[in-house]
Image (spheres, rainbow, N blue to C red):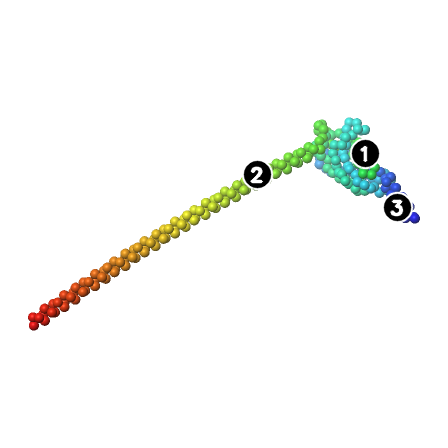
Amino acid sequence: MKLTITALATLLSSVLATVYINNPVADTVWPHDGSPVTITWISSDDSLLTGTVIVQLMDGEDANNLLPILTIASGVSADKKSVTFTPPKDLPGSTNYAVRITSSVDGPHYSHTFTAGDSSITQPFSSSSSKTSSETDNSSSSTKKTSDSSDEEQTDKSSKEEDTESSEEDSESETHSSEEESSSKESESESKSKSESKHSSSETSGAGCSSVVVGGLVGAAAVVAALF
């Protein structure tokens, strides 16, 4: 029974607990040089905060009619009790800034108004400007990468074409050398055939001469024998 009462008391306490923003306060001045700032909040009765919160930067000439100009964080556990972020350098100077923390349990809570931004900037702040700039940078980077990739592909294509032409030239050179070698072999073969033919003719002629001489000697011997 005691456990049930304690649990019920804890539940009621968490339901009744509300967010109280303790930074920024009325005399807070946020830097505009790119330095980070921390927004903090506590439970109004030191009990556990439940649910999640959305943290936004508000601005407006009427403190009772402030408009959100930048979402700092969303889906943050209420019990975390702080977020850190860097104010944009192009944030216009104003003394009417405030932080709004909207709890999923009990709705919105506002800080005191404070000073932030660059006083030399007077045009209204647009949270989409940074996004647009980022998207433009990404688009330019993507275009450059595409261009670089195209140049590399063109270079590779040219290199491949040069290799193909070189290969064709080498092939033609080898074919030409092969034809010259074949022609040389044919010339050697013809020369050899002519030489052999000439040698054969010479031998035949010599044999004929020998036969004539022998025949003459035999005839002379027969004449001498008849005389005796």
Instruction: Say whether disc 3 or disc 1 marks the residue closer to the N-terminus.
Output: 3
Kindly identify which residue carries mark 1: 110
User: Residues at badges 3 and 1 in contact (C-beta under 8 Å)?
Assistant: no
Q: CA distance from mark 3 to mark 1?
A: 30 Å
User: Residues at badges 1 and 2 in contact (C-beta under 8 Å)?
Assistant: no
Amino acid identity at mark 1: Tyr
Q: Position of residue 223 (x, y in %)?
A: 9, 68
Is residue 185 left or right of 107 when viewed as pictured?
left
Disc 2, SS: helix
Q: What numbered label is drawn on residue 147?
A: 2
Q: Residues within 10 Å of mark 1 (few under 14, many from 20)?
A: some
Closer to us: mark 1 or mark 2? 2
Q: Position of residue 54 (x, y in %)?
A: 78, 37
Is residue 85 left or right of 195 when viewed as pictured?
right
Counting the numbered discs, the total is 3
Front one among 174 and 145: 174
- Figure quadrant of residue 114: top right
Kindly identify which residue carries mark 3: 7
- Identify which residue is drawn at 9% across, 71% down: 225
Disc 1, SS: strand
Does residue 103 appear anywhere in the picture? Answer: yes
Instruction: Say whether disc 1 or disc 2 marks the residue closer to the N-terminus.
Output: 1
| The C terminus lies in quadrant | bottom left
